[in-house]
Image (cartoon, grey):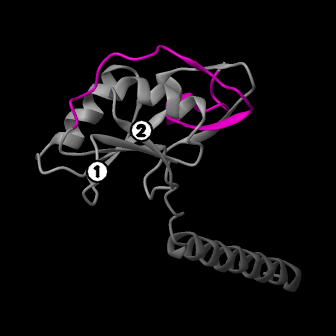
Amino acid sequence: MDIQASARSAATLVVLALVFVISVAWAWSQVTEPFPEAIDDPDCYDVLFATGEDITPEDVLVSVYNAGGRDGLAGETLDRLVRFGFGEGELGDAPKINGSAQIWTGEPDGAVARLLASYLGDGVKVVDQGSPAPGVTVVVGEKFPGVSKGSRAETAGEDTYVCSPPEQDPDTSE
């Protein structure tokens, strides 16, 4: 075997060894890389309704809190609201309230509050208050008579952002 062939063989082995080492290093980095963090779906999307547009129950996410002594009152209330088309938010308990029901919202005079109040009957109080839950919050008390059929839509009196259920994602709707 001549020297030139030996040098060529040695060079080939060095290149193959280098490719092997680089491949092992790349594979190791891929195996030890942490998995990407799970992306949580948002509870709702803020959808802009322009002045004069109708807001329907399907556009509104509602969370319900029980402030009465009756077990299951919040769940029953949310189930009925969902049957009327509202988006399903969270359930929970709240401190006792005066009256039959309260709506907690940052826009107490807005179309969403009027729409939701139409389903909750007389005696519902709309309170300018935030909530830890997504969407508009309904707090039902001891004297809450139940959900009844309300308005099919309310017209936005001004440009309004509504916390709409994920099905209403403006990026996916047509």
> Which residue is tagged 2?
62
Q: Quadrant of residue 12?
A: bottom right
Looking at the picture, how far across and down is residue 161, in whole percent?
A: 66, 38
Nearer to me, 62 or 16: 62
Amino acid type indicated by mark 2: Val
Q: Is residue 173 above or below residue 7?
A: above
Kindly identify which numbered label has been placed on residue 98: 1
Task: Specify the farthest residue to the right.
Answer: 4
Q: Look at the image and tell me in which quarter the N terminus lies.
A: bottom right
Q: Is residue 94 above or below residue 109?
A: below
Looking at the picture, how far across and down is residue 109, in whole percent?
A: 59, 37
Count of all numbered marks drawn on residues in the image: 2
Q: Residues within 10 Å of mark 2 (few under 14, many from 20)?
A: many
Judged by depth in the image, the label closer to the viewer, 1 or 2, is 1
Q: Quadrant of residue 52?
A: top right
Looking at the picture, how far across and down is residue 114, in whole percent?
A: 51, 28
Q: Is residue 37 above or below residue 146?
A: below
Q: Report helix, strand or loop for mark 2.
A: strand
Q: Report helix, strand or loop for mark 1.
A: loop
Looking at the picture, how far across and down is residue 120, in whole percent?
A: 34, 29
Q: Which is the main secondary structure of the residues drawn in magenta? A: loop
Viewed as shown, does residue 48 lie left or right of 96? right
Boundaries of the magenta span: 144-173
Is residue 172 located in the magenta-colored stretch of the structure? Answer: yes
Is residue 102 located in the magenta-colored stretch of the structure? Answer: no
Kindly identify which numbered label has been placed on residue 81: none
Q: Is residue 86 above or below residue 40?
A: above
